[in-house]
Amino acid sequence: MVVDQKRNIGALVLERARAAGTDAAYLPGLSMKRARDMFPGVAKTDEIDAEVIARTTVGMPWALRPVADESDAGAEIKLLASQRRFLTKCSIQSKNRLRSVLLEVDPAFEAAVDLGLAWQVGALAEFGGPVGIVAAGRRRYRRLAVDRAGAPAAKADGLWSAARTSAGSGRPYTASVDAAVATLAKRISDDLASAAAVESVIGSLLSGSAVYRSLLSVPGIGPKTASVLVAGVDIRLFENHDKLASFTGLAPCNRQSGSSLDSASSSRAGNKELKNLLIFSCNSLVGTKGEFGRYYDACRARGMQHNKALKAVARKRLKVVFAVMRNARPYVRA
């Protein structure tokens, strides 16, 4: 049995196949699309998709990927991880929309707002835009921001000053602006709170996992990155760390054409969420004296830019991640 989606619509099919003792595999979506392009016609129907999968399975079986059996706990973790991604995506979309609204209200006030600070998001959710903040009064604003949310007094006063300047600029504010700002800010707070709750549940489920605990011993790997690795990577499906690097998109992509030989560039394939986590989690290693901190310094000394050096460190660290996940043993620092 071969499907082009392991989850969602393909989950029941795979479950029935396993129950019947039938071997199961899946054809990745990108491979499926490229294979369909080789068939005549431009229509996309379920019948054509089924024929593409069947003919690819018969003619190019190496394009298939195995589907490993997973426990009920593993399925639950993957479901929760998917929910966390959804909530994070929703919060990012709301932040972008809120930025747009604030930019239309007053670019100077938008520049003063940091949506990465929970107390500022809370103030916007409670009072709305600059007019709403000023209308609430300085005492009430400070009680919410400083006393309840724990914001530094100096930074709270800075946002208050920006709100007063914006409110007194003579711009034609309306009640709908404050309502839109408050609605978007509240949605951000709710989504982030829900994501944190899901993160807590995932942490509880993985607390007994030896692989999860061992990953936390790897420099730069925190609870979120470790949980995404456990939920998204079945280490039994990878022969070596090179295969894992290809899956995550950290392996360089070689391109040869005519006289252009040995041209290597960054791959755009792989699991993008996992790739970004593995790369940007290496920021915490910059300036450290450990193996990976020294390797980052060496990459920079060779003329690499910061982002390329981070990718190089992430690729080197992936060798450790592979060994730790395969052996379920903590990393011992060199």
Image (spheres, grey):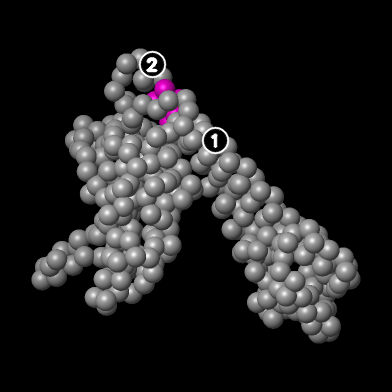
Which mark, residue 252? Answer: none
Q: Give the percent coordinates (x, y) of residue 45.
A: 41, 38
Q: Name which residue type carries label 1.
A: Ser
Disc 1 designates what residue? 204
Main SS category, magenta section: helix
- The boundaries of the magenta stretch are 8-15
Disc 2 designates what residue? 19
| Element carrying mark 1 | helix
Q: Is residue 124 magenta?
A: no
Vertical comparison of 154 with 148: above or below: below
Vertical comparison of 55 with 240: above or below: above
Question: How many discs mark residues in the rendered view?
Answer: 2
Query: Comparing marks 2 and 1, which lies closer to the viewer?
Result: 1
Indicate the quadrant containing the N terminus: top left, top right, bottom left or bottom right: top left
Q: Is residue 200 left or right of residue 155?
A: left
Closer to the camera, 112 or 17?
112
Q: Name which residue type carries label 2.
A: Ala
Residue at 27%, 54% in the rendered image? 334
Q: Residues within 10 Å of mark 2 (few under 14, many from 20)?
A: few
Q: State the residue lying farthest toward the left.
A: 259
Q: Earlier in the sequence, mark 2 or mark 1?
A: 2
Vertical comparison of 280 with 167: above or below: above
Decide if residue 159 is in sight here: no
Where on the picture, by quarter, is residue 46?
Answer: top left
Q: Is residue 46 left or right of residue 147?
A: left
Where on the picture, by quarter, is residue 134?
Answer: bottom right
Residue at 40%, 27% in the rendered image? 70
Q: Is residue 10 magenta?
A: yes
